[in-house]
Amino acid sequence: MGKVLLIATLAVIILLIDLYIFQAVKTTVNSFTPLWKKSLTILFWAITVFSLIGILLANLPTNDFFPWDFKRVIIVGIVIIYFSKVFGVLTLVIDDIFHAGLWVFHKFFPSGNAVSSSKSGITRSEFMSKASLIAVAVPLSTFGAGIISGAHNYRLRKRTIYLPNLPSAFDGIQIGQLSDIHSGSFFSRMGVKKGIDLLIDQKPDVVFF
């Protein structure tokens, strides 16, 4: 029962986020051709559907058909997508709060002069819609690039450490310190081996993780 409630809650959160973000998508693609508008709309909601299906699959018992690595890909993908979308939601919420504040202000202090809208450039709603989509795209692309190319981008850095009170027997000892090994990576276990080989090639006397 607890797992069903968790799945239902996550599904509702995902739908609410996407309904909110879709308003920005709809405003941004308003000037596109009908074919592009339809294609992007289908793509947007297809990601939502796949995410909902992914939540169900991730909660199925692990077996040969649904191994843990497969479920991990699904979970990480959903987390990255919707963590990124939260930034877009925050951008839209800030704009909505601003508009609500203006509405309340004009209710109490009605202005005699209507603000004329500019016929050139983009409207405020178009600008905020594009800003919210950029706010989604930046962390999404950063996380994606980090997972695809940065997980096994091991680098060797050598430092000489001087300790005044170090016993002479330890002079010249070589310490290998390994961090961010990403041993649980689901993309390339050979990538992890590459980092370990890089460490072993230095022939350290002691290894620390």
Image (cartoon, rainbow, N blue to C red):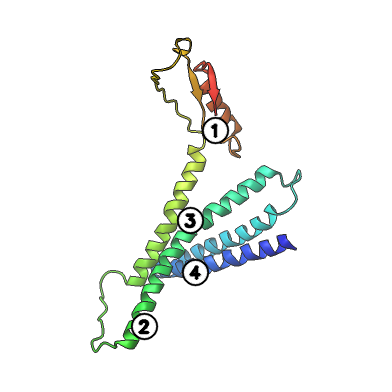
For marks 2 and 1 on the same chain, the one whose residue lies earlier in the sequence: 2
Can residue 16 be seen by looking at this rendering?
A: yes
For marks 2 and 4 on the same chain, the one whose residue lies earlier in the sequence: 4
Kindly identify the amino acid type of the residue bearing the numbered disc 4: Tyr
> In the drawing, what numbered circle is on residue 84?
3
Q: Residue at x 51, y 56 (%)?
A: 83
Question: In whole angstroms, how far apart are the C-alphas of marks 2 and 1?
Answer: 54 Å
**Relative to 78, 26 lies left or right:** left
Question: In whole angstroms, how far apart are the C-alphas of marks 1 and 4?
Answer: 38 Å
Q: Mark 2 or mark 4: which is in front?
A: 2
Q: State the quadrant of the C terminus.
A: top right
Report crowding for label 3: few under 14, some 14 to 19, many 20 or more residues within 10 A (C-alpha): many
- Note whether 187 is above or below 122 in the view shown: above
Kindly identify the amino acid type of the residue bearing the numbered disc 3: Ser
Which image quarter: residue 159? Answer: top left
- Note whether 65 is above or below 29 in the view shown: above
Q: Give the tally of numbered discs.
A: 4
Kindly identify the amino acid type of the residue bearing the numbered disc 1: Ile
Q: Mark 3 or mark 1: which is in front?
A: 1
Which image quarter: residue 129? Answer: bottom left
Q: Which residue has dot 2 on it?
A: 104
